[in-house]
Amino acid sequence: MPVSRRDVLQWQFDLTWSLFEYHLERLEPADFLWEPAAHCWTVRPGDDGGWAPDWADAEPDPIPVPTIGWLTWHIGWWWTVAVDHAQGRTPRERAEIGWPGDGDKAVAWLRDLRTEWLEVLARLDDADLDGIAPFPWQGDPAHTVAHMIAWVNAELMKNAAEIGQLRLLRNARE
């Protein structure tokens, strides 16, 4: 039986999410703001009562080691923007997307984004996958919606691995 491209991308996403969920289920509150190095990026309480990520418009050298809190914000940021584009909504700016404030809220936020993403994937057919990707290439005709979905899968896998490694390192040091 032939398998559609959408089904393959959905399968890849489901596999990636299952590997991510393994770590999400095991995160402890102290994991999120644990600083693995002196030079790191994290999320910090802002003057407005919310939480803001460390950020630089030009990538610093050396690259800071992120905390799990920063990585969960980072996933939430790029995924929120990807969902906005896929839903035809005006994408939010990076500065508009704060960290929820603690680990449980961050995990719930990511799980909600997963649900939204699954709704996006469910309504696509193979013809939709050939459309020009609205994100992250800003309408470059060489990149399709299928590319965007594959990018989300790859970015999520990378960030999940980073979170998993940080969780394992923190646990090994205790």
Image: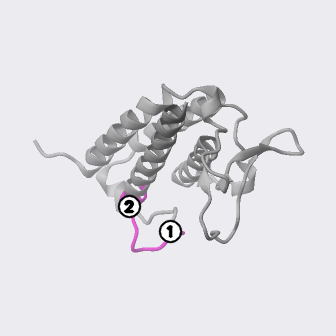
Looking at the rendered image, the quarter that the C terminus falls into is top right
Residue at point 55%, 36% (across, down): 110
Residue at point 57%, 31% (across, down): 107
Pointer 1: what residue?
137
Pointer 2: what residue?
147
Residue at point 77%, 44% (across, down): 44
**Magenta stretch, residue numbers:** 137-148
**Residue type at numbered disc 1:** Trp
The x and y percentages for residue 137 are 50, 68
Residue at point 43%, 66% (across, down): 132
The x and y percentages for residue 83 are 54, 48
Q: CA distance from mark 2 to mark 1?
A: 10 Å
Q: Secondary structure at mark 2?
A: helix
Residue 20 part of the magenta-drawn span = no
Depicted 66 relative to depicted 163: above or below = below
Q: Relative to the observer, which residue lies in front, 143 or 88?
A: 143
Q: Relative to the observer, which residue lies in front, 72 or 153?
A: 72
**Category of crowding for the residue at label 1, using alpha-carbon neighbours closer than 10 angstroms: few (below 14), some (14–19), many (at least 20):** some
Q: Is residue 43 visible?
A: yes
Quadrant position of residue 18:
top left
- The secondary structure that most of the magenta stretch takes on is loop
Residue 92 falls left or right of residue 173? right
Residue 13's tag is none
